[in-house]
Image: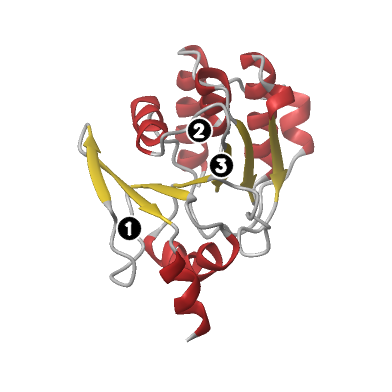
Amino acid sequence: MQTDERRRTLLLSAAAAAGTILLPTHAHAQALAEPDRLDVPYVPTPQEVVERMLEMGRVGKNDVLYDLGCGDGRIVVTAARKRGARGTGIDLNPVRIAEAKENAKTAGVAERVNFKVGDLFQADVSPATVVTLYLLPSVNVKLRPRLWQQLKVGTRVVSHAFDMGPEWPPEKKDEVDGRTIYFWTITDAHKKALKV
């Protein structure tokens, strides 16, 4: 356990040194407690994958992006800083949310983004025009009906690494440095499928 914690600390330190993220102050980090159990482990999305996800999702200044399982907020922050979008990040882990808020401040986009501790399966994502994910296959499949129900027709969904199961094949796939990115659009057919 100590080795895992040390490895995570080294990874975060390296990312901070590279300017990718800003670590919360020691006092702030100590005041936060990580949840005992998370459905998805925290693994940051590489920045080149973030950029390609936003490109595939055609994210622009009129978009409202929701990142489910947002981690340190890099997707939301990049969407706001480079593409002028507004965004919300949701994560169960208050430590990650604290990092995300600090990263938004550092990037100068705090007024365009919102980060909150929350359960993806309880969250209202209906305002989104784009949803991004880096979850696990089982979580994606469980989340799929909620996305079909809440998202408006035309909303784009982009997932790093994992698809949505055979019931929702991706419209597009791409690869960046051996990492797969999947793309879907919410359609009328998804809304009708929920009523059957």
> Mark 2 near mark 3, Cβ–Cβ under 8 Å?
yes
Residue type at mark 3?
A: Cys
Please tell me which of labels 1 and 2 falls first in the chain. 2
- Amino acid, disc 1: Asp
Q: Position of residue 37 (x, y in %)?
A: 59, 60
Circle 3 is placed at which residue position?
Answer: 70
Q: Is residue 149 left or right of residue 179?
A: right
Element under disc 1: loop
Amino acid at pointer 2: Ile
Q: Secondary structure at mark 3?
A: loop
Within 10 Å of disc 3 (Cα), the crowding (few <14, some 14-19, many 20+) is many
Q: Which residue is mark 1?
A: 163
Q: How is the image coloured?
A: secondary structure
Q: Nearer the viewer, residue 149 or 116?
A: 149
For the residues marked 2 and 3, what is the alpha-carbon distance in whole angstroms?
7 Å
Point out residue 45 in the picture as x, y percentages from the top left corner.
41, 35
Nearer the N terminus, badge 1 or badge 3?
3
Query: Residue drawn 52% across and 29% down?
Result: 74
